[in-house]
Image (tube, helix red, strand yellow):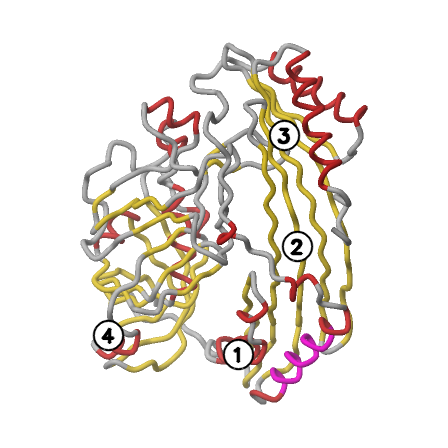
Amino acid sequence: MSGTPFQKRGDVEALAEHALSRALQLGASGADVLCCSSCGSSLSLLDGEIEECSSGVSAGIGVRTIISDGRQGIASGSRLDAASVDALVEWSLHNARASEPEEGVGLYEGPLISDPGLDAEDLAIRSIRHEERMKYCLEMTKIARGSDARVRSVREAAWRNGWGESFFATTNGLSGWESSSGASCGLLVLAEEGEYSEMGGYGIDALRMDEIDIVKIAKRAVKDTVSALGGAPVPTGTYTVMIEPEAAAALVDVVGKLFCAPEIQKGRSLLRGKLGQNVASPCVSLTDNGRIPWKQGTSSWDYEGVPTQRTELVKNGTAAAFLYNLQSAAKDGVRTTGNCSRTMSSLPDVGTTNLILEAGQESPSALQSRIADGIYITEFMGLHTIDPVSGDFSLGAKGLRIENGGLTVPVSGVTIASNLLDLMKKITALGSDLTFSGSVAAPTVVIENVVIAGK
């Protein structure tokens, strides 16, 4: 347990049990405790010189109390001693008594089931030292400088790694530990050619060291940046759009939030009332899967202790299911899907785990070869502005021109204004290149008849 504030798991378990007992003594009908600890180190270089170098540890405990009429409260803190936890319990109950009763508030009745196959702790990441972080960042800087003469500056070569663990327990007798590790690696470069300049980069997050290839990351950062030099708008018109996987994943992430039951129940999702209806092209299938080994959204259970699962949200274009925690499921009279999300300081909510736009059968090159007049989109701007109720949006985009199946000139300064459901129904093909960006995965996406505003 070296390197983390949780020096002894037994002490944490005893503290959690103390908090739960105290909550019942003070009048709660139920309670749960979430204890989290993490430690990490980061290094960032600017043109080979240290810009940031830091390490830190954190630990805390959150106590949620429930009153029998459906009121609930939360309180959290970083002091791990009995007196401080007693104060948290009292504050949690104070917050519960000040809240309004809600339907469906309760604790999970089933067992807490741990699946060792879903553990995500790589000891190689935990053992990385400062000298190794420096080596990785210097090597990325060297590769970037030597890859293309148009690279004028390596604005950031960064490496971060860390690990953490959490303990969850309830007054229903559930208790269990989970732990994970992770590392991120990325490069930001400035490229110039004549009167044009472009800042860009690339990076990845991974749970295993063998998923990180710093040579590929550095070369991808340079390639993506220099390929955007001199970008200009295309003439306003209707085009076939081909979206690269990382940009597609960013769009899928927005779509995934629309399937969270609380948003639907509160009228904040355009999918309200559309279960069983056609919401996308028949080639589109979207799943949420919290049980994929070595992925960021994976765990044995959610933050209510419910086992995670695979849920088909869209099947062949039809809305098939929504995502639930215990409370939202009770409101709709269905079973929870194991999608409770929360932090130590927040009440239970609903979120995605590993959100996946399922891949197709054809390679990206095969899909591209059939596009005579199109745009290959590498980045969207303004995704946060999509209206979740109407689905209307106006997004900036950049990428490359596709002419007669080949990539030609860089494109920037264009706008796509449409509706999210309309766009999903215009998807005509999905590539075989499924790529994870954090906990969201998507392949190359092809969409026909997209109106793009340019010059």
| Magenta highlight on residue 136 | yes
The earlier-in-sequence mark between 1 and 2 is 2
Quote the CA–CA distance across marks 1 and 2: 24 Å
Give the residue number, with chain letter if any, for mark 1: 216
Q: Is residue 8 left or right of residue 333?
A: right
Amino acid, disc 4: Asp
Please name the residue shown 49% across and 44% down the image.
Answer: 300
Q: Nearer the viewer, mark 1 or mark 2?
A: 2
Q: Which mark is residue 373?
A: 4
Tag 1 and tag 4, C-beta contact below 8 Å: no
Please name the residue shown 30% across and 62% down the image.
Answer: 359
Give the residue number, with chain letter if any, for mark 3: 33
Quote the CA–CA distance across marks 1 and 3: 42 Å
Amino acid, disc 3: Val
Relative height, residue 165 to residue 247 (above, below): above
Q: Which mark is residue 163?
A: 2
Tell me where the magenta segment starts and ends, as one range: 134-145
Image coords of residue 163 (percent x, y): 66, 54
The earlier-in-sequence mark between 1 and 4 is 1
Tag 3 and tag 4, C-beta contact below 8 Å: no
Label 1: few (<14), some (14–19) or many (≥20) C-alpha neighbours in 10 Å: some
The earlier-in-sequence mark between 2 and 4 is 2
